[in-house]
Amino acid sequence: MQPGMNWAYKTTPQTQLNGREIDYSRGKGLGGSSAINFAVWTLGPKDDYDEWARQVGDQAFNWQNARRRFDDIENINLEVDRKYQRYYQPLAKDHGNRGKVNVESPPIWEKGVTEVADAAEEFGFPINKDINSGDPIGIGLFPSTSKGGIRITAADAFLSHPPANLQIQTNSPVHKISFEGTQAVAAEVEGNRHYTATKDIILCAGALDTPKLLKLSGIGPRSELTQHHLPCISDLPGVGANLQDHLYIPLTLHLKPGLDDRPALFSSPTALANARTTFRTSRSGPLTHMLHACLIYSARLPDLSSDPTFLQLPPWTQQHVLAPTVPHFEMESQSPPLMPLPQDRSYFTLLVFFFHPQSRGSVTLGSADPQAAPVCDARFLTEEFDRAMAVRSVRAAMEFLRTPKVADMCDGVVQVPRGESEEEILEYVRENCGTSWHMTGTARIEVKGSGQQEDGMGVVDTRLRVKGVQGLRVADMSVMPFVPNCHTQAVAYQIGAIAAEKLCEEYGLD
C-alpha cells in the first residue's frame, strides 16, 4: 500500500479479544476504501435484501430491485476458459454489462486452485458456478473489481470522466455540516472554507466517519454532544450506535513443495522485479494470475437451529439466519499467510469469516476536534451467540482441513488452534482474529416492528434523509440495518444507486 492512503484507525482495546486493539483501516483519497480493499465482488444472498426490505418497510430494497440496479452498476467480463467452466460460469442473463464497475475473473488460474475445489466438492461443498446469482451457498470463485488485472476503484469507475457539472475538490477534509435552523446549508472543510448547497448535502464518509461528522454537526445523542460542548440540532441516539462487523480467523498449514508456484516468485527479488516489469509493460507474466484466483466457500451449519444460543435470538433474527440462501459462515482459500513467514516455503491458508454477528459496538467522539480519529469500540464477541458461531465455524473448517485430499497436500501445521475444545478455539480466536473491515449500521435506516412503529434508533428514513433536519442525506454502509452476509463492496455501490434513484424520483431527474 502506498503511504498516505490509509486513515489507520484502530478500535479501542477489545475485552473479548484479550485487550487487543484491532486494525480499522479506512481508505484515504478518491475512491475511499475501494482503493485499499481486497477488490472482492460478492453481492450476497437474495434473502438478505428481502430481509432489508422487510425491516425498513420499503420493497425498493428487496432482491428483485437490487438485482436490477446491479445490472446498471457492473460491467462483467464473462469470458471463462473452457477448463475452468466446471467451477465458474456466470450467465449473461444474471449480470450486467453496461455499468461502470468492471468485474472479472483471472484468465489463468493459479496452480492448485482446481485441486482444492475438487477436494472441497468431495468434502460436501457443492460447486457453485456463480456465487453472485443471489444464492452463494457452495464453493466457487469470487470475481474481483478489476480490468486486465488492474484494480478498479470507485474513482476509476465514476470519476475518471466526470460530467461537466461536477467539481471534485481534493485535500479538503470536511469538518462539519453547517445549518440555518434545521436546514443543512453548507459543508465546512479544512481551512475554514464553505461549500454551500441549494438542495441536498449527501454524506458518504463510511460507517466510522459519517457518525463522527454527524455528531460534529450537532446530530446525535444529546448527552454526548453536550459532553463535547456541541449544539444539538437533532437528538438522534442511533448516530454512532449499532456498529456491526465481521471477524475472520486464519488457519495456515505447510503445503507440500511443488503444489504451487509462489515460492519461485516471491522468494526471489530478481524474479519478482522481472514479473513486475513484464506486467507493467505487456500485462503478461505470473502477476496476471498469482494471488488472483481465490475460492470462496459459503456454508451453513446443519444443526444451528438447535443451538441454545440460537434459540435465544429474536424470532425474526432466527428466521433470517435460517433462510435458504443465507450462509452461516464463509471460508476463503488461496490467500497468502497473514503473518510473516519464509517466502521459500508454500502454505495453505484458509480464512474463516463469522457471519450474523449479534454484538453491537459504537462510534463516539474523542473530542470536538474534527481532526481527531473517531473512537471505535466494536465490542467484538461480547454476545454469546457470536462466540458459539466462532467455535462452530472453526471446527467445521478444521474438519475440512482433515479431509484426505487436503491432508495429502499438506505436511505440517503453521497456525491453528492447539485443540478443538471450545476453550482452545476461543482462545485462538481471541489472540489471532482480525476484522474484515465490513463496518456497518452506525446511521441506519429506521427499522419498523411488526406494528410498523419505528424503534427509535433510526437515523435516516428510506429516502436516506437524516431525521429531524432538512437537506441532509447519508449514502454509505452506515445506513444498513444489519451487516450483510457477504463482503460489502458491492452493497456499498448498491446503496449509492439507491440514493441516486430516490433523488431522481424526488427531483424529477433522468
Image: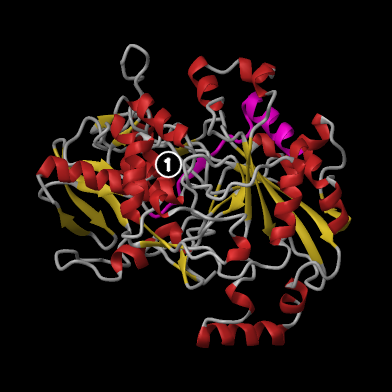
Left or right? Give the position of 482 relative to 85.
Answer: left
Residue 47: x and y in percent read 46, 32
User: In the rendered structure, which amino acid carries the disc numbered 1?
Assistant: Leu
Residue at the spot x=51%, y=39% of the render? 135
Question: Quadrant of the rendered structure where residue 507 is?
Answer: top left
Q: Residue at position x 13%, y 51% from top? A: 510
Q: Which element is circle 1 on?
A: loop
**Residue under numbered circle 1:** 365
Task: Residue 376: say if magenta.
Answer: yes
Does residue 308 lie above or below 120 as drawn?
A: above
Residue 470 horizontal side relative to residue 298, left or right: left
* Coloring scheme used: secondary structure
Q: Position of residue 472 (x, y in %)?
A: 22, 42
The answer to whether residue 338 is visible is: no
Position of residue 403 in the picture relative to residue 327 (left or right) = right
Residue closest to the far top:
451
Rendered position, 346 above or below 425: below
Who's the residue at 9% across and 45% down the image? Answer: 508
The magenta segment is 371-394
Q: Position of residue 316 (x, y in %)?
A: 48, 18
Residue 339, located in which quarter of the rendered image? bottom right
